[in-house]
Image (cartoon, rainbow, N blue to C red):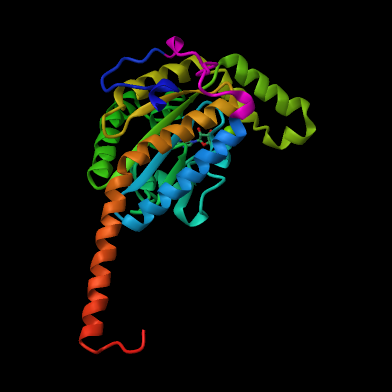
Amino acid sequence: MSDDLLWKVPEGEHVKLKKYDPGYVHPSFKHDEADEALAQLGREIDELQELLSAAQHHSLLMVLQGMDTSGKDGTIRHVFSNMNPQGCSVTSFKVPTPEEAAHDFLWRINNVTPPKGVIGVFNRSQYEDVLVVRVHNLVPEDVWQRRYKEINHFEKRLADNGTIILKFFLHISQDEQAERLQARVDEKDKAWKISSSDFVERQYWDDYQQAYEDALSQCSTNEAPWYIVPANHKWYRNLAIAQTLVDTMRKYKDEWKSDLEERGRKELEALQQLRDSGKIKGL
Ligand code: AMP
Ligand code: MG
């Protein structure tokens, strides 16, 4: 179902962001029912995470990228509000520290990939190294150019080792960003969210869109697909992402459940043997 709600980038597709409407809303989701629908999806994410955690076969990595104000933080707050905090880890990637900068760009990312049983959310990610780094010429072109391949190899390695990967690009329009930035200036209780650098970065809008198009085109693979999320409407963005997460995890549900049943059977057998041998009394 989630395929209609947002756009999965097929491997090898040459993405043109102008073709995707940031204000898109699929008619199956209604604004006035959004809170209840999201709460229900949130409960299902929690249930599926419990199975993921118990089965210990997979981890899940969710990458969130998007222009400033596109809603990366809001997505995390709303989509995971029903989650057991033990089942989820969130990492926000900032300007690299001196220690991080002294290593290769994937070092800090590799250090915090989710272990089996955990949903790891990346608020920004390895992709900053082909986005902000490219837009501001922080490294020579031949260095950022080869990173697409390096990222693909890295993600393939994670996927081969049991990580389910979902990458979401929160697609907002330039006008919507202007409104969100202006709201932070106008509304005193939002002023703490102002980051003057967001206003500077906005000047590079077209360069960022170009950099995103290349990242989405070169790094959407079958094992680590990119999804373009229409994100002008916050309520819709949350629902589309939550539904995609649920649909993806549901595919593994039977496998996780049957593994757990098998494990339960083995434990009961082992217990019976202990009883039969007289090692356990009274229980
Ligand atoms: P925020 O997400 O608003 O806290 O901002 C974090 C800032 O860190 C953004 O301006 C990012 O572009 C920047 N950033 C994240 N990763 C990198 C990186 N690898 N190199 C340079 N800047 C980065
Ligand atoms: Mg910011």
- Height in image: 51 above or below 278? above
Q: Position of residue 56 (x, y in %)?
A: 31, 56
The residue located at (53%, 34%) in the rendering is: 72
Q: Position of residue 80 (x, y in %)?
A: 53, 44
The residue located at (37%, 52%) in the rendering is: 51
Provide the residue span drawn in magenta: 17-33
The residue located at (61%, 24%) in the rendering is: 31
- Height in image: 175 above or below 221? above
Quadrant position of the C terminus in the picture? bottom left
Q: Is residue 21 magenta?
A: yes
Q: Position of residue 95 (x, y in %)?
A: 49, 39
Q: Residue furthest top?
A: 19
Q: Nearer the viewer, residue 96 or 47?
A: 47
Q: Nearer the viewer, residue 95 or 68?
A: 68
Q: Is 36 left or right of 112, judged from the image as shown?
A: right
- Height in image: 82 above or below 205? below
Quadrant position of the N terminus in the picture? top left
Determine which quarter of the picture holds residue 275.
bottom left
Q: Is 241 left or right of 147, judged from the image as shown?
A: right
